[in-house]
């Protein structure tokens, strides 16, 4: 009977530790309310700029440039 009691207490402690760790990790990964809107606006602004660049220069976005017949890059 003593072994069963110790085993159940040990199991309860492990479950409580897992729950505590989950709560700490969950609160650490959650966004802060004050910074969330500024971060969202900055990300939207960056996405808009990236879309404009992609529409005008798709090769520049990929980091490549067309090559001329003599082996040099055009525009350099």
Image (tube, rainbow, N blue to C red):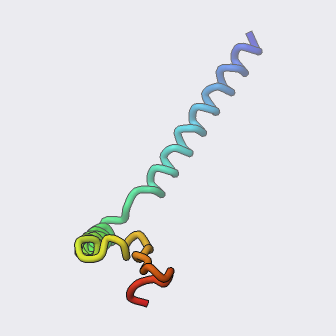
Residue found at the far bottom of this picture:
76
Q: Nearer the viewer, residue 17 or 66?
A: 66
Q: Residue at x 40, y 75 (%)?
A: 66
Q: Is residue 34 visible?
A: no
Quadrant position of residue 59: bottom left
Q: Nearer the viewer, residue 13 or 25?
A: 25
| Quadrant (top left/top right/bottom left/bottom right) for the N terminus | top right
Vertical relation: 48 (above or below) 26: below
Question: Residue 5 at what x, y percent from top left?
Answer: 69, 17
Q: Residue at x 37, y 76 (%)?
A: 60
Residue 9 located left or right of residue 74: right
Question: Residue 64 at what x, y percent from top left?
Answer: 44, 73
Question: Residue 30 at what x, y percent from top left?
Answer: 40, 56
Question: Residue 33 at what x, y percent from top left?
Answer: 31, 65
Q: Nearer the viewer, residue 23 or 12?
A: 23
Residue 22 located left or right of residue 9: left
Q: Is residue 71 visible?
A: yes
Vertical relation: 54 (above or below) 76: above
Residue 56 located left or right of residue 7: left
Q: Residue at x 52, y 38 (%)?
A: 19
| Quadrant (top left/top right/bottom left/bottom right) for the C terminus | bottom left
Instruction: Please count the marks in the image.
Output: 0
Vertical relation: 22 (above or below) 56: above
Vertical relation: 66 (above or below) 23: below
Residue found at the far front of this picture:
69
Residue found at the far right of this picture:
3
Residue 72 located left or right of residue 74: right
Q: Nearer the viewer, residue 2 or 70?
A: 70
Quadrant position of residue 61: bottom left
Quadrant position of residue 45: bottom left
């Amino acid at each position: 009977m003593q072994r069963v009691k110790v085993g159940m207490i040990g199991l309860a402690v492990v479950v409580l530790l897992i729950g505590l760790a989950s709560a700490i990790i969950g609160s650490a990964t959650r966004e802060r309310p004050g910074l969330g809107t500024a971060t969202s606006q900055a990300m939207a602004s960056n996405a808009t700029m990236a879309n404009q660049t992609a529409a005008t220069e798709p090769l520049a976005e990929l980091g490549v440039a067309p090559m001329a017949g003599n082996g040099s890059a055009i525009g350099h």
